[in-house]
Image (cartoon, rainbow, N blue to C red):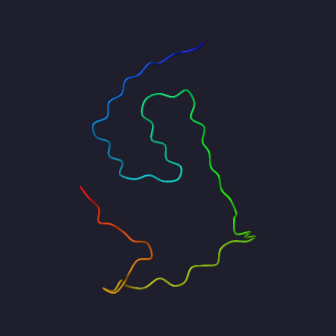
Amino acid sequence: MNFFVHQNIVIHNLKIDGISNSSVCQIGSAGIIKPLAQLYNTGGFTGPAPAAGPQPERVSEEFVPLVPLVEPSR
């Protein structure tokens, strides 16, 4: 049995608070959404990653994150 869906979707505002590698944002309908994960070992690693170093006990004013972060907005 075949279903044909005709849609007219108008989006005035769309806010997504968070998204990760396996998230799906669907607007409208779809017959099948197949999950897909493509993981590649481009470094040729053969074992687990080494353990992380010790974490700082407290964050000082001079602490600079390795990834630039932006202030959350509301």
Q: Is residue 19 left or right of residue 15?
A: right
Q: Is 29 on the left or on the right of 41, as rendered?
A: left
- Of 30 and 48, nearer the camera is 30
- Position of 40 with respect to 73 (left or right) is right
Residue 73 versus residue 7 in the image, above or below = below
Which residue is at the front of the view, 30 or 56? 30
Residue 39: name its quadrant. Answer: bottom right
The x, y position of residue 42, in whole percent, is: 69, 65
Which residue appears at 38% of the width and 81% of the height? Answer: 64
How many marks do you count on the picture? 0
Q: Is residue 38 above or below residue 55?
A: above
- Residue 48 position by quadrant: bottom right
Q: Considering the image in quadrants, where does the C terminus appear?
A: bottom left
What residue is drawn where x is 49% and y is 47%? 23
Q: Position of residue 20 (x, y in %)?
A: 48, 53
Quarter of the image for the N terminus: give it. top right
Outermost residue, left direction? Answer: 74
Q: Is residue 2 above or below residue 60?
A: above
Q: Residue furthest top?
A: 1
| Residue depicted at x 58% and y 14% | 2
Closest to the observer, 10 or 2: 10
Identify the residue shown where x is 39% and y is 71%: 68
Which quarter of the figure has residue 32?
Answer: top right
Q: Where is residue 30 drawn, in percent x and y? A: 51, 28
